[in-house]
Image (cartoon, rainbow, N blue to C red):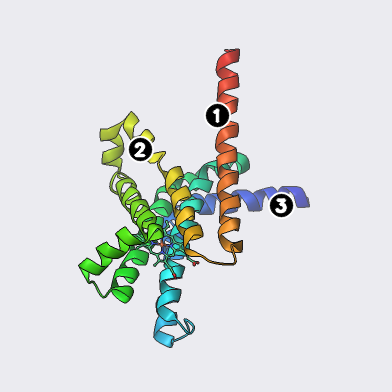
Amino acid sequence: MNAATDNITAQNFFTKLLQLKFLKPLVFILCLLPMALLVQGAINGTLGVNPVETLIREMGDWAIYFLLMTLSITPLRALLNLSWLIKCRRMLGLFSFFYACLHFVSFIWFEHFFDLTEIVKDIIKRPFITIGFVCLLMLSALAVTSTDNMIRRLKKRWKTLHQLVYPIALLALLHYFMMIKADYQHPLILLVWLVALFGYRYYVFLKKVKKTTHD
Ligand code: HEM
């Protein structure tokens, strides 16, 4: 066997390994890691001078990372021919919702100590919080309708509803841009990521249009 066949065999072996049942549990454990590290940091007191701020911000970051990772599955699957990736898409989307919920819970707990009047006031008064809240409500609608049963029940409407994930990602980024006063580097990187995803969608759309006009 030469190096090339060795390489292909190794690749096949790795793909088969990933396709096996432990792909989902493995991804599940990896998705929980950010939370585990944050909890460990909180216990060890290594979250910096403002641990509450770090906690809220990190949860927000992970909510948006998982959202963008979810949206990246389809292009990655098509471009790299990795069909098994689709098995993880729903889980990644649900983890975005999970981290967004933790982000919200840390906010109402550590910033408002569950004072409902103060929470509502804050949501109404601060536009970036209003946008975050709308974003969370929209994410909740996607999470609730993500089951197989809902996919069957909603039929075509399911796809339309889940297209909302793009506006949600845009709103989440807007929420991020609105809260910062300086150093836009991090949200800008995320914006480039999102624009690339929109670019891919547009490319697929153009290809479809071209195909239907040729048929
Ligand atoms: C009710 C819903 C939400 C509330 C109340 C909320 C609130 C907040 C607050 C208070 C901050 C930090 C502000 C600061 O430290 O000065 C923040 C930052 C952030 N939030 Fe939210 N948020 C919500 C929803 C979301 C959602 C749904 C996402 C993403 C999907 C998100 C992503 C982010 C990001 C990425 C940051 C910036 C993190 C960083 O500085 O690195 N938020 N949010």
State yes or no: discs 3 and 1 in contact (Cβ < 8 Å). no
Which numbered dot is residue 52? none
Amino acid type, mark 1: Phe
| In-image side of 147 versus 90 (left or right) | left
How crowded pointer 3 is (Cα within 10 Å; few <14, some 14-19, many 20+) is rated as few
Residue at label 3?
6
Q: Nearer the viewer, residue 170 or 12?
A: 170
Q: Where is 194 relative to 160, above or below?
A: below
| In-image side of 8 versus 147 (left or right) | right
Q: Can residue 212 be seen in this view?
A: yes
- The image position of residue 61, as x and y in percent, is 47, 63
Which numbered dot is residue 161? 2
Q: Quadrant of residue 198?
A: top right
Amino acid type, mark 3: Asp
User: For the residue with label 2, is its CB less than 8 Å from the closest atom of ligand 1?
Assistant: no
Residue drawn at (60%, 20%), measured in percent from left and top? 210
Q: What is the secondary structure assignment of the residue under circle 3?
A: helix
